């Protein structure tokens, strides 16, 4: 009953233009380069993050830089950013500070990405297609701000905007999940749809511009 009541309240107080849907088996398609096409995600819980785990799946044939997940606050445009600088090179930003992970043998095709970070140690960990890439340290003792704009398809150079077409994502993104704690990535398949901040099974979002929702191939 409590879960049902929470769901009703969430639907009643959704921001204008937002919708909540179960997107299991669906993908967001960004068909072409643009500085106007993007998806805004609304977290189910707004809270400062002392740790997190972010997972998503994507497919693209881009070889230029592009954004996969952009979480911006008014004080820091790259509060939390997962960015591809070039094929096989992933940048993770926390509080405008970045570390770079290099995948030794990137393959063409869909990719399953998971990254975790904890404030107490500053350790960030990246997994690609269920395999660990490595661990690096950044922003030890930092707290990720809660009042954020979360955007797929574009990289925010200011809060909620200032997009660059040459950093836009072209392709498909799906199964986006965000937790407020570090998830054991070895057991990821058992927690795919139970994330508490962003949950693909009950995603609150708004699509702008040329974005299409289709069944996953």
Image (tube, rainbow, N blue to C red):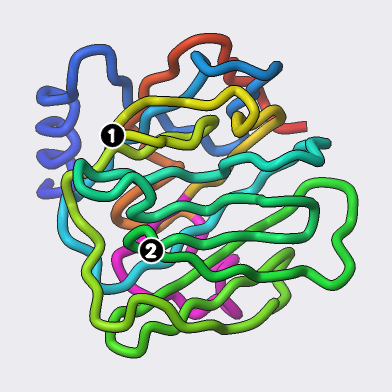
Q: Residue at x 53, y 53 (%)?
A: 82
Q: Residue at x 11, y 25 (%)?
A: 13
Q: Nearer the viewer, residue 160 or 178?
A: 160
Horizontal placement of 52 versus 85: left or right?
Answer: left
SS at circle 1: loop
Q: 114 above or below 202?
A: below
Q: 116 above or below 58?
A: below
**Relative image position of residue 77 (x, y in whole percent):** 33, 45
Q: Which residues are magenta?
A: 177-192
Q: Residue at x 69, y 28 (%)?
A: 170
**Relative image position of residue 149 (x, y in whole percent):** 29, 37
Quadrant, the C terminus: top right
Horizontal placement of 165 versus 4: left or right?
Answer: right
Do we see residue 95 in this rendering? Answer: yes
Do we see residue 26 in this rendering? Answer: no
> How far, Cα to Cα, is label 2 from label 1?
15 Å
Horizontal placement of 146 versus 100: left or right?
Answer: left
**Relative image position of residue 101 (x, y in whole percent):** 65, 70
Q: 11 above or below 74?
A: above
Q: Which residue is mark 2?
A: 94
Q: Residue at x 68, y 56 (%)?
A: 112
Q: Nearer the viewer, residue 167 or 206?
A: 167
Residue 117 forms part of the magenta stretch: no
């Amino acid at each position: 009953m409590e879960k049902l009541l929470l769901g009703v309240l969430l639907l009643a107080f959704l921001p204008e233009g937002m919708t909540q849907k179960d997107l299991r088996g669906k993908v967001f398609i960004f068909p072409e380069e643009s500085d106007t096409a993007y998806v805004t995600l609304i977290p189910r819980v707004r809270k400062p993050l002392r740790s997190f785990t972010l997972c998503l799946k994507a497919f693209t044939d881009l070889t230029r830089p592009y954004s996969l997940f952009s979480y911006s606050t008014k004080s820091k445009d790259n509060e939390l950013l997962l960015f591809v600088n070039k094929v096989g090179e992933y940048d993770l930003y926390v509080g405008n500070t970045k570390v770079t992970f290099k995948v030794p043998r990137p393959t063409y095709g869909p990719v399953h990405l998971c990254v975790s970070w904890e404030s107490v140690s500053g350790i960030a960990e990246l997994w690609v297609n269920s395999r660990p890439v490595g661990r690096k340290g950044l922003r030890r003792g930092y707290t990720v701000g809660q009042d954020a704009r979360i955007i797929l398809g574009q990289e925010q150079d200011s809060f909620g905007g200032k997009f660059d077409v040459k950093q836009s994502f072209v392709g498909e993104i799906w199964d986006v999940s965000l937790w407020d704690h570090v998830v054991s990535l070895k057991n990821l398949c058992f927690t795919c749809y139970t994330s508490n901040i962003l949950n693909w099974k009950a995603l609150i979002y708004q699509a702008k511009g040329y974005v299409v929702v289709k069944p996953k191939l």
